[in-house]
Image (cartoon, grey):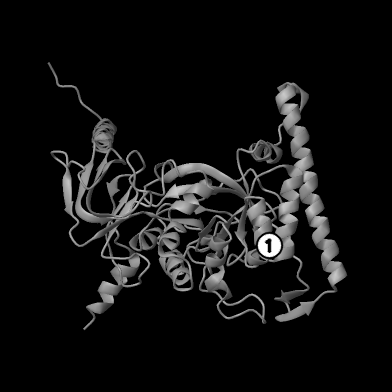
């Protein structure tokens, strides 16, 4: 009997099938690690001077001075090392922009004033070179936001879309995803009489009355959008699909109106912050404040309304010419003393690696050390409703943690081991590769 001839396509398909099977099998294999004899800062209680952390199947299985190390676990000697929860950058554009000066690598905004239906997750580029650089300094997860505000100055509308929480490891966005949407971004309209005209490369001044009128018009447009969304919500919940035409913009705002998603409002000046708080009160929606350069002027209001603040980099110049030089340095300590929940963020993609420095500066200017650590670990997890999974080293939580040579807020500290979703993850990156390359230059 003559042997059956197989086509090249058959063998290619068979090889791919075997490869995928092996890959899936490898991914499904349980990974167990044990960090032994390290000083553990759980942030859920006092530090454990010499203890063990066991990580199994992506989660923390046990932590404590007497935590048993299971057979077959890959053991890391933690003698002389310290263990902390992985750092959380609560406002970044990692994966949305690669080279700021090259527009083809920037995907932060879309056309239009209101784009609530857009989600950052759809544009995140997992192979971004900025992500491994962020990992080297101990950042394991982040909230990636669309839009252009703070350091993001590329235009864009009032509602650029929804923020996404991701882990900083994975071949695809599905592997990276922690929560597809954690809030709706809003760039609150500013009142500024001075603007820069790129056509003449000079500053222009506008009368205050004109600027105020423009700002009020934008706020009214935002209010009208929410009113339309509320009517649309009623049509969806009480009517049939034949009784209304589907509107993706209005549909995306329904979770905000239901209180399932907060508005993440970017506002810097005290007047703008007050306006944003008043708007959210009127619309009966939750608010998280981003930026908050003058939040110290309205701290009583923020405390009363229980509004959390996501601060930008502490290494920043004073906003006003009569501000003290250390206004940005001392702001975290001032909010902490007022009892306001806050986090510290990078508001960047290329400068994410400096997040520990920002928290370290806040500590140097009055913020207690543990609170400075919490500002980039536990606090953002609580603000975004992710503290059941992230933020502390406790049994049952996702295995995002770092093993360091000392205090992670010290610039000389090294991250020896980094775990993301319970996997030991490489800290190699382009910065290190270039350093090694040119260090060997003859």
Which residue, as the protein is rendered here, is positioned at the far right?
209
Q: Quadrant of the C terminus?
A: bottom left
- Residue on which the image places disc 1: 298
The residue lying at 42 percent from left, 69 percent from top is 360
Judged from the image, the secondary structure of the residue bearing numbered disc 1 is helix
Who is closer to the viewer here, 172 or 263?
A: 263
Q: Which quadrant, please, contains the N terminus?
A: top left
- Name the side, left or right, on which 87 lies relative to 323: left
Which percent across, then down, holds residue 4? 19, 22
Check the image and report above or below for 337 versus 181: below
Q: Is residue 24 left or right of residue 2?
A: right
Expressed as whole percent of the image width and height from the top left, the position of residue 208 reads 84, 71
**Residue at 75% in and 70% down:** 192
Residue located at (49% from left, 52% from top): 380
Q: Nearer the viewer, residue 8 or 134?
A: 134
Q: Position of residue 195 (x, y in %)?
A: 74, 74
Up/down of 52 relative to 329, above or below: above
């Amino acid at each position: 009997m003559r042997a059956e001839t197989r086509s090249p396509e058959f063998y290619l398909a068979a090889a791919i099938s075997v490869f995928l099977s092996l890959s899936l099998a490898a991914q499904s294999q349980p990974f167990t690690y044990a960090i032994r004899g390290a000083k553990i800062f759980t942030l859920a209680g006092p530090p454990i001077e010499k203890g063990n952390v066991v990580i199994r199947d992506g989660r923390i299985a046990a932590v404590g001075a007497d935590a048993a190390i299971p057979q077959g676990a890959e053991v890391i000697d933690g003698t002389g090392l310290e263990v902390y929860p992985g750092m959380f950058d609560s406002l970044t554009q990692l994966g949305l922009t690669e080279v700021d000066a090259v527009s083809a690598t920037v995907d932060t905004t879309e056309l239009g004033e209101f784009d609530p239906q857009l989600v950052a997750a759809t544009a995140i580029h997992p192979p971004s070179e900025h992500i491994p650089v962020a990992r080297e300094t101990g950042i394991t997860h982040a909230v990636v936001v669309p839009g252009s505000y703070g350091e993001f100055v590329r235009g864009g509308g009032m509602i650029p879309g929804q923020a996404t929480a991701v882990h900083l490891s994975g071949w695809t966005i599905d592997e990276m995803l922690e929560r597809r949407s954690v809030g709706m971004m809003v760039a609150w309209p500013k009142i500024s009489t001075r603007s820069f005209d790129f056509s003449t490369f000079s500053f222009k001044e506008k009368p205050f009355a004109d600027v105020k009128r423009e700002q009020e018009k934008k706020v009214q447009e935002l209010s009208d959008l929410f009113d339309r969304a509320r009517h649309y919500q009623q049509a969806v919940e009480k009517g049939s699909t034949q009784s209304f035409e589907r509107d993706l913009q209005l549909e995306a705002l329904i979770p905000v109106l239901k209180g399932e998603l907060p508005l993440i409002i970017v506002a810097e000046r005290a007047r703008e912050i007050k306006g944003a708080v008043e708007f959210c009160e009127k619309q009966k929606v939750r608010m998280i404040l981003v930026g908050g350069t003058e939040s110290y002027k309205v701290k009583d209001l923020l405390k009363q309304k229980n509004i959390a603040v996501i601060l930008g980099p502490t290494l920043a110049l004073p906003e006003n010419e009569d501000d003290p030089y250390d206004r940005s340095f001392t702001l975290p300590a001032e909010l902490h003393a007022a009892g306001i929940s806050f986090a510290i963020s990078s508001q960047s993609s290329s400068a994410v690696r400096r997040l520990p420095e920002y928290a370290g500066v806040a500590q140097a200017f009055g913020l207690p050390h543990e609170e400075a650590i919490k500002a980039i670990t536990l606090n953002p997890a609580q603000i975004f409703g992710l503290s059941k999974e992230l933020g502390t080293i406790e049994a049952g939580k996702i295995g995002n943690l770092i093993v360091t040579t000392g205090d992670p807020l010290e610039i000389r500290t090294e991250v020896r081991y980094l775990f993301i979703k319970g996997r030991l993850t490489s800290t190699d990156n382009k910065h290190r590769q270039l350093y090694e390359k040119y260090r060997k230059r003859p």
